[in-house]
Image: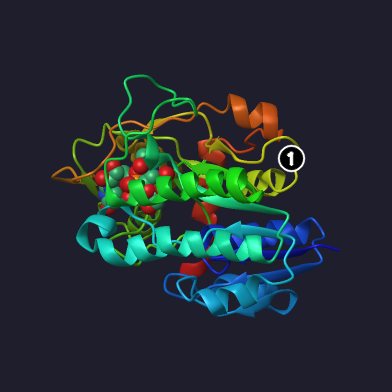
Amino acid sequence: MKVYVVTGGAGFIGSAVVRTLLAQGAGTVRVVDNFLTGRESNLSDIRSRVELDQSDIRDYNALAAAIRGADIVFHLAAIPSVPRSIQDPAPSHQVNIDGTFNVLRASVEAKVERVVYAASSSAYGDTEVLPKVESMPPRPQSPYAVQKLAGEYYSSVFHSCFGLETVALRFFNVYGERQDPSSPYSGVLSLFFKALIERRSPTIFGDGEQTRDFTYVEDVAALCWKAASAPGVAGKMYNAGNGHRYSLNSVWDLLQKIEGVSLRPQYGPSRVGDVRDSQADTTAARRDLGHAPQYTLEQGLRRTLAWYKSCST
Ligand code: UD2
């Protein structure tokens, strides 16, 4: 039986990966999380089935001890958010770049079979052509995008120079159960769900016609699982998206329709560092990782809304 380590495993996406591993019958699952943004409550239903190590990925010795004995590492620990990386760039630089370097270095030392790295669609920046294909040159527009791209480059170079198998997955605006809406840096859909349930208007930055490839967390977790064992993909990077794009205005309209309410959004100035349009080409992930997203936006929104409602009662 393999030993799996999930950094950031108490986070929104990390805990979904942990659940997928358990559902696949994984032997040992070890969560490494410093609870900066992760929460033990994200693991409450599966707490007895996972090992929990409260190490910080910035602390090399603690991290190396946590990774020792692992076969597969899913590296999801990060400080996300484009605006957060602009407001306060040093912590996200230290976690997202130095922390990723530590995870890769510790994985070499521990002779890990493969590391699956959570990269970001932000690395593309604004492109002239949509959908965004892995072969496009990156154009990072924020510290966060640079940091996540550096992690990709490090992953690739740890493969070519040190023989560590790595697969980088560029996550495209993931949403779903357990996404925390409590911070101003929270993902937009978590803020939309909260506003909808509280019958408040959401705030939209810009005209709301910017588009995103909103991707349901279960699909991303399934892709992570496949990336851990697919043959012939070491050192490579793939899009982890749904393959469609929706404007913020259209998603808010759909949510109002689902809930049968009418709440006009408030509009504010566009965010610095914001990408205008985002949509993944999913061809390579389908071909090499055998992955086809299972959830339409409406299905994912309905499932997620039901979950937020179950928490608010
Ligand atoms: C980026 C990445 C995404 C992921 C994420 C992690 C892109 C295209 N996507 O997401 O893949 O790595 O970073 O943090 O770079 N907005 C509002 N109202 C709000 C909050 C946000 O209108 O209350 C807007 C925001 O200006 C943006 C969109 O919603 O246009 C999405 O923002 P976000 O913070 O949810 O995610 P984004 O696209 O920066």
In the shown orientation, is residue 262 left or right of residue 312?
Answer: left
In the shown orientation, is residue 87 left or right of residue 91?
Answer: left
| Residue 103 against residue 250 in the figure, above or below | below
Identify which residue is drawn at 46% across, 60% down: 179
Question: What x and y, as percent, mark residue 5?
Answer: 66, 65
Q: How many residues crowd mark 1 within 10 Å: few (<14), some (14–19), many (20+)? A: few
| Residue 144 against residue 236 in the figure, above or below | below
**Residue reaching furthest to the top:** 129
Question: What x and y, as percent, mark residue 211?
Answer: 34, 33
- When asked about the image quadrant of residue 29, the answer is bottom right
Residue that numbered label 1 is attached to: 230
Q: Amino acid at mark 1?
A: Ala
| Residue 292 against residue 9 in the figure, above or below | above
Question: What x and y, as percent, mark residue 148?
Answer: 41, 49
Residue 289, can we see it? yes
In the shown orientation, is residue 211 left or right of residue 306?
Answer: left
Q: Nearer the viewer, residue 139 or 283?
A: 139
Identify which residue is drawn at 23% across, 44% down: 273
